[in-house]
Amino acid sequence: MAETIAPIANDLAVKSRSVRRTIVEMAHRAHCGHVGSALSTVDILSVLYHSFLRIDPTQPQWADRDRFILSKGHGCTALYATLAQRGFFPVAELETFLRDGTLFAGHPSARHVPGVELSTGSLGHGINVGIGMALAGKRGEKNYRTVVLVSDGECDEGSTWEAALTAGFWKLNKLIVIVDYNKIQSFGRVADIMELEPFAAKWTTFNWHVQEINGHDHAEIARALSKATEETQRPSVIIAHTIKGKGVSFMEDTVDWHYWPPSDDQKAKAFSELCD
Amino acid sequence: MRTTFVKTLEAIAAKDQNIMLLTGDLGFTVLENFRDTYPKQYLNAGVAEQNMIGVAAGLALCGKRVFVYSIIPFVTFRCLEQIRNDLCYHRLPVCIVGVGAGYSYGHQGATHHAMEDISIMRSLSGMTVVCPGDPVETECAVRTIATHDGPCYLRLGKAGEPRLHTSVPDFHLGKAILMQEGTEATLIATSTMLETAVKVTKILAEKGMLIRLLSMPTVKPIDTDAIRAAAIDTPFLVTLEEHSPIGGLGSAVAEVLSVHDIRTRHLLISGPSMFTDTIGSTAFLRRQAGLDEESVREKILHFKK
């Protein structure tokens, strides 16, 4: 197992750094925020798109594809950069991000971006729609998996817990939810605003298979996804402990980088930390 | 209407396995046969309407045609943003079936009344709003919606509404149905007020006032041609709905008159934009709101002067 994961992880480290550079570049060029929220998801997306999801960039609507929903739509630059890296569209197209007439909005639109399954931006929608997808697969005896990446902040939403109750009861074993648990929500620390702990216990009591991992360790992410697919009775939640702004020292673990766009100097400093 | 709805859906579901029915844990004595006959096409999503709409969206994104059933406020207001983002923005073939138009839930109180729903659903981009006036229109509407691409809102009464059409009308989404020809006014009615409109039309005819009666089962898109023709052919228009005056059928007709610069007189008859202050039956609440036959007739005769 370790033998196969090590080279992938090494390759993913390169890919993840590249995505992080693209994220900082996009935010700098478009003068926009949500950089920290995007950076915390990069390693998860890298593992998903390069070693887990059964997808075909030349056929984004392939009927039997695995489904991925970025429920925390504000972290979309990470998704755009990963989709481009995976071949859904040229990376150069991301230069249009937030420009008038672009395909790439500040929250992802399935109407515009190939590979985006669900338009998100309002929190607390992704798992619910993912349940519908997983249910259609289950009733149609399909093998595709549905993966939903949510933020910790959106676990404040009632709809998230309606979904948790439902998926557990309906035994949607091909549904995998990953929580990007970076411990910072919009206006402060999760522990100060709306504490989620005991978080794992909540999902367990809702009849989910629960794993807690380091959300920046590619091998750990891959192992957790693999283990989730072995479930035959329960949906899986992977609580990924992450660091907001991961990869850029001065952006890490701060509320500020939910909002600020990087200046020229900050972009240069970030790039110096993200070089291969 | 709800019985007709489910009977019609059962017939469609028998032939189309992509049809699905979701309920927010309501439908006692109504949905059991569907549940037992088509278990793979049925789901009770529990008392969790926001989740139910999201689930419907996910199913529709995977090729299903979904009907989502509950009492109007619960399946519209409670989960409005899910309807807007998940259904409308994605242009999904999901029909929201709301039971309890206007004061249909009478004694059950203001939480169950639906006097703002047409307005709110009509304002959503891409949403088709269908308000059948009797069981015949309900059956036509369900059959049509089952092949319609895009989100729909189907506003039903409750139970026991009489058949007002003697034959199956030529039913199309976005088209009015001519129920009686007349020259002295045009009465346009929708949803639960069609029965009252038919009675008022008959009473006025007995008094020698022949009015054109249009049933308007689709409030969005509204039948602009029928409104224009009525404005040309008859001296004034009357709209009748069991709804607030804000944003319903009357508003839709007024918008057509304004946008298309159609000159005529228009009497908007509706309920008030306020919660009911008194508790009572559907008939009682309609009388309080001025939506009984006598009140409607008097308003029309007064406006004619």
Image (cartoon, helix red, strand yellow):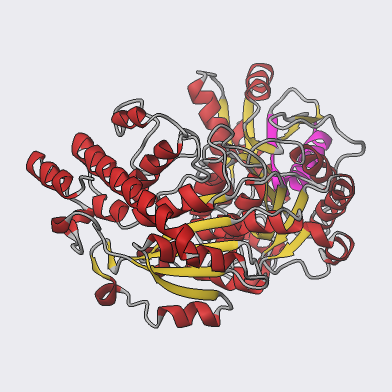
Residue A240 in the image: state x and y as whole percent.
39, 67
Q: Report if residue B89 lies within the magenta region.
A: no
Residue A8 visible within the image: yes
Residue B163: % across, % down? 87, 47
Q: In this view, does A270 lie to the left or right of B26?
A: left
- Vertical placement of A205 versus A65: above or below? below
Q: The C terminus of chain A is located in which quarter?
A: top left
Where does residue B300 sit, x and y in percent of width and height? 65, 38
Q: Name the image quarter holding residue B189.
A: top right
| B302 versus B257 height, above or below | below
| Residue sitting at the far right | B167
Residue at the extreme front of the image, as rendered: A3
The residue at the point 47 percent across, 80 percent down is: A202
Q: Is the magenta stretch mostly helix, strand or loop?
A: helix
The number of discs equals 0
Left or right? Give the position of A122 relative to B148. Answer: left
What span is in magenta? B186-208
Question: Front-most of A9 and B227?
Answer: A9
* Residue placed most toward the observer, A127 or B270: A127
- Whether B102 is drawn above or below B93: the answer is below
**Residue at 57% across, 54% down:** B115
Q: Residue at x 76, y 30 (%)?
A: B172
Name the residue nearer the viewer: B218 or A51: A51
Is B197 colored magenta in this rendering?
yes
Do we see residue B99 in this rendering? no
Q: Which of B40 and B237 is in front in this view?
A: B40
- Residue A175 drawn at (x, y percent): 59, 62
